[in-house]
């Protein structure tokens, strides 16, 4: 029976971007079903008393350098967004609205790449709309979907569930009830999905 890999993320997190570049292939290698769980990282920080590494200058500098190490390791490009930290409320509503649709992957790619390759301020509705349009998506339609009360409630519910399950940052993965925090724990995630002790 296939296992499920839950991926709690926020597109405003560079570590989530790095994890997103690797998670589909990891799931394919292990035969797992990848379940995307969009959440609001700012709300998680507030609920748990946590904060972005950028809030501590020395830690922020180190984190930026370390994430470039991982980008090289994964053979992907990561550019630090000059608008960081970005308010991702609309982005995460879009990611929630896209769950289960045939445009989910395209929309997530537009958001992650807009944020971490194209260095765009996706909190700006005009910039966000243009980013979706350039990805071949109907920006007006997606804005309408993201504004639906059910979508807003779903994002709040997933964020609340994340906090209840012990999530304090992004990305966070679950294999069953075993939690793995950070893009630097993907080896452990893969081992768990492969039935190895971790």
Image: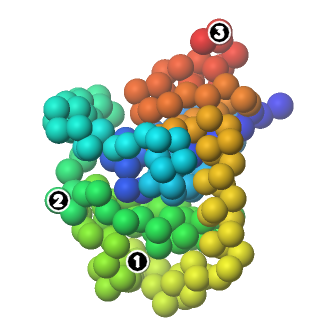
Between the residue at mark 2 and the residue at mark 3, the CA separation in whole angstroms equals: 40 Å
**In the shown orientation, is residue 99 left or right of residue 134?**
right
CB contact under 8 Å: marks 1 and 2: no
The relative height of residue 77 versus residue 63 in the rendered view (above or below) is below
Give the residue drawn at x 38%, y 43%: 51
Which of disc 2 and disc 1 is earlier in sequence?
Answer: 2
Mark 2 surroundings within 10 Å by alpha-carbon count, few (fewer than 14), some (14 through 19), many (20 or more): few
The relative height of residue 174 versus residue 131 in the rendered view (above or below) is above
- In the image, 48 versus 19, the foreground residue is 48
What is the quadrant of the N terminus in the image? top right
Residue 10 in view here: no
| Label placed on residue 82 | 2
Q: Position of residue 106 (x, y in %)?
A: 48, 66
Between the residue at mark 1 and the residue at mark 3, the CA separation in whole angstroms equals: 42 Å
Q: Position of residue 56 (x, y in %)?
A: 23, 38
Which of disc 3 and disc 1 is earlier in sequence?
Answer: 1
Between the residue at mark 1 and the residue at mark 2, the CA separation in whole angstroms equals: 20 Å
**In the shown orientation, is residue 115 left or right of residue 90?**
left
Q: Please tell me whether mark 2 sits on a helix, a strand or a loop.
A: loop
Give the residue drawn at x 33%, y 34%: 74
| Label placed on residue 132 | 1
The relative height of residue 88 versus residue 127 in the rendered view (above or below) is above
Q: Position of residue 157 (x, y in %)?
A: 69, 59
Which residue was labeled with disc 3? Answer: 197
Which of disc 3 and disc 2 is earlier in sequence?
Answer: 2
Picture quadrant where residue 197 is located: top right
**In the shown orientation, is residue 106 left or right of residue 101?**
left
């Amino acid at each position: 029976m296939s296992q499920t890999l839950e991926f709690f993320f926020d597109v405003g997190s560079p570590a989530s971007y790095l994890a997103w570049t690797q998670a589909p292939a990891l799931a394919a290698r292990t035969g797992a079903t990848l379940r995307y769980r969009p959440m609001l990282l700012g709300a998680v920080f507030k609920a748990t008393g946590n904060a972005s590494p950028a809030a501590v200058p020395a830690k922020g500098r180190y984190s930026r350098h370390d994430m470039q190490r991982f980008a090289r390791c994964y053979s992907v490009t990561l550019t630090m967004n000059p608008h960081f930290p970005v308010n991702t409320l609309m982005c995460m509503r879009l990611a929630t609205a896209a769950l289960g649709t045939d445009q989910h992957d395209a929309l997530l790619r537009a958001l992650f790449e807009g944020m971490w390759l194209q260095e765009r301020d996706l909190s700006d509705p005009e910039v966000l709309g243009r980013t979706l349009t350039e990805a071949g998506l109907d920006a007006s339609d997606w804005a309408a979907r993201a504004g639906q009360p059910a979508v807003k409630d779903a994002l709040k519910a997933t964020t609340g569930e994340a906090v209840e399950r012990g999530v304090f940052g992004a990305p966070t993965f679950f294999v069953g009830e075993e939690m793995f925090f950070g893009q630097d724990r993907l080896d452990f995630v893969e081992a768990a999905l492969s039935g190895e002790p971790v």
